[in-house]
């Protein structure tokens, strides 16, 4: 009986809180201007653009080209590695520059792209394979499955977030 008296006010408070959150979300969503369909590229164009950016990203890692990453990673970019470590744009570029590893190949493939928010947001899922030698000269090959979130900013796509999971060795 005691639990029922406590539970009832808690349920009421939870229902009121839920209603307030639902109202707030609905108000914000309603207040946002609709994205003009004519201003956004077709899905096929978006998919091709995102696949090209993934190829550029791979090339940046292979060539240690920070300029590519500066262009395609948004200022608030955050990535989560297979180890669980997360890094920002500045940290990722600094890590690439100081790494003792030397890549001999870096390829993103099997990339599926989906768009949202009238074509303003894209999510890609693909496979990334890199090979090379570590700082001690020992050869390695790594395969990951990645998910990246891209946002159109001023007409250009930038990656805002990503995550990779380790795949078994081939």
Image (cartoon, rainbow, N blue to C red):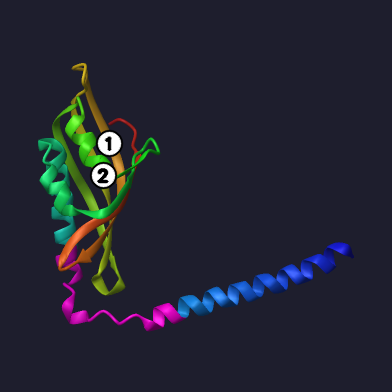
Quadrant location, the C terminus? top left
Residue picked out by circle 1: 143
Marked residue nearer the N-terminal end (2 or 1): 2
> Residue shown at 32%/49% (left/top)?
78
Instruction: Tell me, yes or no, whether the highlighted magenta stretch contains residue 38.
Output: yes
| Callout 2 crowding tier (Cα within 10 Å): few <14, some 14–19, many ≥20 | some
Image coordinates of residue 69 in percent, x first then y, are 17, 47
User: Which residue in the structure is indicated by mark 2?
Assistant: 127
**Label 1: how many Cα within 10 Å (few below 14, some 14–19, many 20+):** many
Residue under the image location 53 percent in, 76 percent down: 22
- What is the total number of numbered labels drawn onto the structure image? 2
* Residue 65 in the image, given as x and y percentages of width and height: 11, 41
Q: Position of residue 167 (x, y in %)?
A: 33, 37
In the image, is residue 131 above or below residue 163?
A: above
Query: Does 90 sit above or below residue 118?
Result: above
**For this view, does 104 lie left or right of residue 28?**
left
- Which residue is nearer to you in this view: 132 or 111? 132
Q: Nearer the viewer, residue 23 or 112?
A: 23
Q: x%, y% of residue 144?
A: 30, 39
State the residue in front, 81 or 92. Answer: 92
The one nearer the camera, 95 or 51, is: 95
Q: Residue at x 40, y 83 (%)?
A: 30
What SS does tag 1 mark?
Answer: strand
Per the picture, the main secondary structure of the magenta-coloured stretch is helix
Location of residue 38 by image quarter:
bottom left
Q: Which residues lie in the magenta part?
A: 27-46
* Residues at circles 2 and 1 in contact by the CB criterion of under 8 Å: yes
Mark 2–mark 1 Cα distance, whole angstroms, equals: 7 Å
Residue 157 magenta-highlighted: no
Q: Of helix, strand and loop, which one carries label 2?
A: strand
């Amino acid at each position: 009986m005691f639990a029922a008296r406590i539970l009832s006010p808690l349920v009421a408070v939870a229902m009121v809180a839920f209603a307030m959150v639902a109202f707030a979300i609905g108000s914000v969503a309603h207040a946002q201007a609709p994205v003009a369909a004519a201003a956004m590229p077709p899905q096929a164009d978006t998919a091709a653009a995102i696949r090209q950016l993934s190829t550029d990203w791979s090339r940046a890692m292979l060539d240690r080209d920070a300029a590519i990453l500066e262009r395609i990673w948004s200022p608030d970019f955050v990535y989560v590695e297979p180890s669980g470590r997360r890094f920002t744009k500045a940290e990722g570029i600094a890590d690439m520059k100081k790494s003792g590893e030397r890549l001999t190949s870096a390829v993103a493939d099997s990339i599926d792209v989906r768009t949202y928010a009238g074509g303003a947001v894209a999510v890609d899922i693909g496979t990334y394979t890199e090979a090379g030698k570590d700082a001690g000269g020992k050869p390695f090959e790594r395969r990951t499955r990645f998910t990246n979130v891209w946002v159109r900013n001023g007409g250009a796509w930038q990656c805002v977030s990503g995550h990779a999971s380790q795949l078994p060795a081939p």
